[in-house]
Image: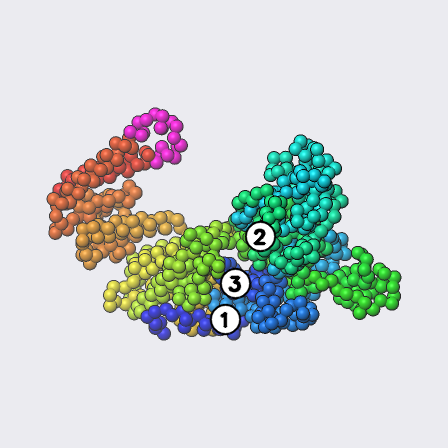
Amino acid sequence: MQISDKYSPKDTESRWYSYWMENKYFHSVPDERPPYTIVIPPPNVTGILHMGHMLNNTIQDVLVRRARMQGFNACWVPGTDHASIATEAKVVAKLKSEGINKADLSREEFLKHAWEWTDQYGGTILEQLKKLGASCDWDRTRFTMEPKMSAQVIKSFVDLYRKGLIYRGHRMINWDPEAKTNISDEEVIFKEQNGKLYYLKYKIEDSEEFISVATTRPETIFGDTAICVNPQDERYLHLKNKKVIVPVVGRVIPIIEDHYVDLEFGTGALKITPAHDIADYEIGQKHNLQVIDSLDDAGNLNEHGMHYAGKNRFQVRKLIAKELEERNLLLKAEDYVNKVGTSERTGAVIEPKLSVQWFLKMNDLAKPALDIVMKDEVKFYPEKFKNTYKYWMENIRDWNISRQLWWGQQIPAYYFGNGEDDFVVAENMEEALILAKEKSGNVELSMDMLRQDEDALDTWFSSWIWPMSVFDGILEPENKDIQYYYPTSDLVTGPDIIFFWVARMVMAGLEFRNEIPFKNVYFTGIVRDKQRRKMSKSLGNSPDPLELIDKYGADGVRVGILLSSAAGNDLLFDEDLMLQGRNFATKIWNAYRLVQGWERDKNVPAQQADLQTIVWFENQMNKTIEEIEDQFAKFRISDALHLIYKLIWDDFCSWYLEAVKPAYGMPVSEEVYGKTIAFFEELMKLLHPFMPFLTEELWQNIAVRTPQEALIIAQQKQRSDFSSETIKNFEISKEIISGIRNYRQSKGISPKDRVEIFTNAAQFPNDSVIKKLANVSAIHYTQKTEKPSFTFLVGATEISVPFSEHLDLEEEKAKTEEEIKYLKGFLISVEKKLSNEKFVSGAPVQVVENERKKQKDALEKIALLEAKMNSF
């Protein structure tokens, strides 16, 4: 069936995606084939498709489709992450718009709203991935909060607690006042902010003297419990054992001494606020200082804030600075640039806060996980990220795994009394009751006397077991799926979560199964705009991926995004690359239309030029397949695509089809047509992982195919032997053809006018191809012509094309003289270098050799041009 004049992605994409889904090509069950497994980095359930997802998931789809076409049982497991902070924030905002305050709801009522929100908006991103062509096994879609997944998170917590790796402790944590939860150190983003450095006067008790203390946060003075100086600071020796009065507050606090204070920094005196600074807390513990927390969970001053109670911390900063000035307690205020910790999720400025939290001991987990990567048992691509990984693992701290949220897995700790240790950890309430009775010795305990910890687990605590939990490997460690699909094959992710997720998955895999979770990790770059800015909604520099797909087709977008994505380097997004992708699709479509339009005749024999071209292209394709395999082995996906692009656009379309196409109005032999279609089919197989929709459309048009013969499951051509000599000879032929074509173009000679050529060569390997593509009437081997001619070199081979009778010889003579003059000047500069002994003895060998080659080439060209002058 003759295809249409133009390729229409809109007509093609939904049709073939539905066809693939109906025939369950994406679905995988364990069988006798080797598995190839990828688990999707689960996007937030709240998320929508952005350019980073486009890059990441296109690469995953290329890998999984290629594996499917290489005989592997390919399984790509999709799913979403419940994203506790982000989702809870959206649900709270939605409730607020409806006049409902979260604080007025019970946990069960809030979770009902959260599930309703998730059911309505969650999973949008997975549907969007289908537009991209993602061949995930949708029957295996998982969600980190679904019952079986949550059960595995809880079981893993209980197991780790019983091994002594999880503990409950009173620590200084990072508090997000907007999300009203603590976050880990790794989720704190430090940003430079312009502020003020306030120099406050702390009056010495019973004296008119004062100590000046500099602070960027005067609103925290309500929590001051000491002033600290260095014991060697001569400025303050006379104040030993004295006390000062906290400005505005009026509280008397001691002056203490500690070597922690830097003599050179600021005034040499620090206000110690143990509840609001990690370093201050440690000094406070050391000196047994009182801890006064003057902020509530929302970042407002509490009752310790006196007349500022209820006001926001930043509002109070301005107000108290004004009050201090009015009371003559402010010495000065200077402009100051400070690095401030902010929440990765909400952007809120973090408050250090004392809190009882749950922690996972990391040192024992980190060491084997570091060794595994350093020994390349888990390989990183690019390898440079091993250094980042090593840094994180060697500087690891215990993981704060509890969050003050309701949306997430609730910590399975059950309290039965008021003592610090009056709790048990169990997978469910029934088991907890048995353990609580044993621990307390109180057989009268009942379920209604137990209360479960209010906190939820950190989202990463559910996703660190993702490669196992998607196959129910924590609940059923011997089940068929986990035994077959785990360890997974490749992980594709961003370097920004190398610690959050990659390192933790390696630790979890070794801890729970004594196995690595994946064999290779490919780190994509960050998608940036032409100004190298990271793409974001706030900057307005991120295009809508679905609009791009609508404009250029999914295949065009996939090719465009991969062409610019060098392994591990940031991708500079350029919409022109999407256009290039679409143009590539058009080129392939038109190439097939050309072949499809040829008239075939079984009585027409294949021409010598056809046979020479077929032999060359078969070898060229085999060579390219070997190079593609090498690039995939190195995870150089973009480079693999460039090779396929060249093979199709340059080798097949520009050379092969030109060489074998029949003369206008003439038929082509069945043999040549059959070979051309066979080559085209192999090219479609190579290209399919990158451009699945276009290739399936053309594949299905070439012949009537059963579902068992669909391109998506066709097997790619394996690497075969090739003749480098054949390929080299054809390259020489292409140079000769290009040289003759250049002569025609420069002299305005029509391609239809036949020419003869003279050469010092005894034979050209592909003389029939040269005659056909350069429109040569005769090749005179080992002969020179006396006629004025255009002469050029291909290696050491001299080729002369006698000038047309219509050529202006005087003009040609002048041009030749000018060219000789230029080359002689160039030769003098090269020979000057080579006659300089210092250059020849001091320059690298290769540099000297390059100059000698320039000398040789120039001499040969001058000799040719002088011979040409003689022929005039």
Is 835 within the magenta? yes
Q: Quadrant of residue 769?
A: bottom left
Q: Residue tagged by mark 1?
A: 20
Q: Residue tagged by mark 2?
A: 318
| Residue 382 coordinates in the image, percent (x, y) | 52, 49
Query: CA–CA distance between discs 2 and 3?
Result: 63 Å
Q: Earlier in the sequence, mark 1 or mark 2?
A: 1
Is 650 within the magenta? no
Marks 1,2: beta carbons within 8 A: no
Which label belongs to residue 68? 3
User: In the rendered structure, which segment of residues is drawn in magenta?
Assistant: 832-850
Residue occupying image coordinates x 77% and y 63%: 414
Residue 193 higher or lower than 266, as above or below: below
* Front residue (pair 445, 433): 445
| Residue 262 showing in the rendered view | yes
Residue occupying image coordinates x 16% and y 48%: 803
Indicate which label's residue lies in the foreground, 1 or 2: 2
Residue occupying image coordinates x 26% and y 56%: 773
Indicate which label's residue lies in the foreground, 1 or 3: 1
* Front residue (pair 247, 291): 247
Query: CA–CA distance between discs 1 and 2?
Result: 63 Å
